Amino acid sequence: MLRDITIGQYYPADSIIHRLDPRVKLFFVFIYVLSLFMFGNLVSYCLATILLVVAIYYAKIPVKFLIRGFKPIFVLLIFTTFMKLFITDGTVWFKLWKFTITKEGVIDVIHILVRILYLIIASSLLTYTTTPTRLTDALEQVFKPLNKLKVPVHELTMMMSIALRFIPILVEETDKIMKAQSSRCMNFSSGNILKRIKNLVPILIPLFVAALRRADDLALAMESRCYQGGEGRTKMRILKYKRQDFFVYILLAIYFVFSLIIHLLL
Amino acid sequence: MIKAENIVYEYIRRDEEGNVEGIDRVLDGISLDVQTGEFIAVIGHNGSGKSTFARNLNRLLTPTEGSLWIDGLNSDDMENTWKIRQSTGMVFQNPDNQIISSVVEEDVGFGPENMGVPTDDIWKRVEDALNAVDMIKYRSYSPNKLSGGQKQRVAIAGVLAMHPKCIILDEATAMLDPQGRLETLQTVKALNKMEKITIILITQDMEEVIYADKVFVMDHGKITMSGTPREIFTNEEALKECQLDLPQALKLANELRKEGIDITEGLLTAEELVDAICQLY
């Protein structure tokens, strides 16, 4: 189950999307998500869908892999949809015992579903097609101006890239701890919710201890390799825009302006 | 390359209010001299102070007393920190906890990036380092997909890319399987021979000591014995006192000799022993 978490993971492949400048992808996802929440009409959703399908196609990422990433949030999604479906007031369409389904409710649910799903697909496409280092390089570059406001941009992006590197290691560790506790008759799959939450404690504590120990080791290793923060540091990869990057920027601008016009007209 | 004169290192234990509870003298007057290009092994049981000693060499710690020169730089001087860390690279025990990046080549480039090496130069260094440890095939892999021995070789490449004069392996083989151990040791030996890099191998495993030019045995923060592996192994009693054991081939040879079989002294490896036994008949 834990291995299903693919959020934030990189999917190695050689595609046009993989080769794009990470800053372009970052801006793209940002504007795309913004547009999803700004314009809520049929035409703009259609446009968004086309854009997403094209992106998935060119990224050469198997749909199966993409869907697997949703599994952990699937329950959450169903829960919110049902809540929204039954508690929204408005014109009644359907009534069953105490539950009423309203026209407004259904429309709201569609909005939520489309927005959340597209948001997740778009942002996971970003991480699937960009190595964590390139992503953090992009973030560092984009937020560089904040350095003047004394925001530790380099340190924050470093933390992020280390966190991404350690996700699979900690997942594996959790798996190991769970097995170790199971072998001592710990039961994780029965009992009521309260009991199950209680049962998590013997997993979380060893996990935290191990994570802190790892952090200590890593800090030593970084220091011994002359790490001294962002100052005086050179970069292995310098980000440079290429032709296709500008093309994608233009595409993004056209999409946004077009959606905006339709939004204003409707 | 390394010159230690009577160095002492103390850990100060404090209680919750910060009062000194006690002082642990982990290194107790260590003096040694390491020449450039030597292959040195430091052995000792758990808690003998060998890791603390290694950390002193890389200026992760500085001696409480005594003086330590690394590549002509006094480790007492704050300003030498980065130069010392560049000239003596360190490989740690847990392969997972010392790889910083999610891609092999980017991890190897981490050291040079920190040193402020120009971009083109970094790529050349990374390539050379990965070639030297024979990991160039895996340059775009995720470290999570590599075996323990391969990860350790990447870690060595990460140190190599900083162009060090000396590499310290702090029990770098302790968590590896026999295959990974062999890979790591062979890599280190090749670097010592071809690139003339000084190697300081810190270990508990007697089998690894065989290949060293010089061995230091540590016990309770002191160097109790030093010499070539052959010299060290002739003194079995003293080794036992330091809770250390002889390599298997040597043990077998000693047992055979006790049984009255005439085997020459000072054999270290299994191959030598096999040859000696074959020559008997």
Image (spheres, coloured by chain):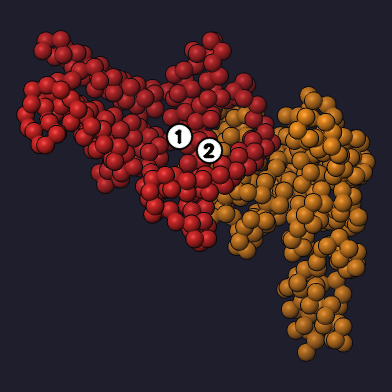
Chain colours: A red, B orange
Q: Position of residue B226 (x, y in %)?
A: 89, 56
Mark 1, secondary structure of its residue = helix
Amino acid tagged 1: Pro
Furthest residue in direction left, as rendered? A93
Say whether residue A18 is visible: no
Residue A210 versus residue A122 in the image, above or below:
below
Furthest residue in direction front, as rendered? A97
Amino acid tagged 2: Ser
Q: Position of residue B1 (x, y in %)?
A: 83, 41
Q: Say which quadrant the C terminus of chain B sits in.
A: bottom right
**Which chain does the numbered disc 1 sit on?**
A
Q: Residue A132: which disc?
A: 1
Mark 2 crowdedness (10 Å alpha carbons): few <14, some 14-19, many ≥20: many
Residue A128 relative to residue B171: left or right: left
Residue B53 falls in image quadrant: top right
Q: Residue A145: which disc?
A: none
Q: Residue at x 51, y 56 (%)?
A: A181
What distance separates the C-alpha of mark 2 from that of mark 1? 8 Å
As rendered, which of A7 and B17 lies closer to the eye? B17
Residue B55 versus residue A34 in the image, above or below:
below
Q: Residue B101: which disc?
A: 2
**Which chain does the numbered disc 2 sit on?**
B
Q: Position of residue A176 (x, y in %)?
A: 51, 54
Q: Residue at x 62, y 20 (%)?
A: A231
Residue A227 falls in image quadrant: top right
Say whether marks 2 and 1 touch (CB < 8 Å): yes
Residue A64 versus residue A24 in the image, above or below:
below
Q: Position of residue A97 (x, y in %)?
A: 11, 37
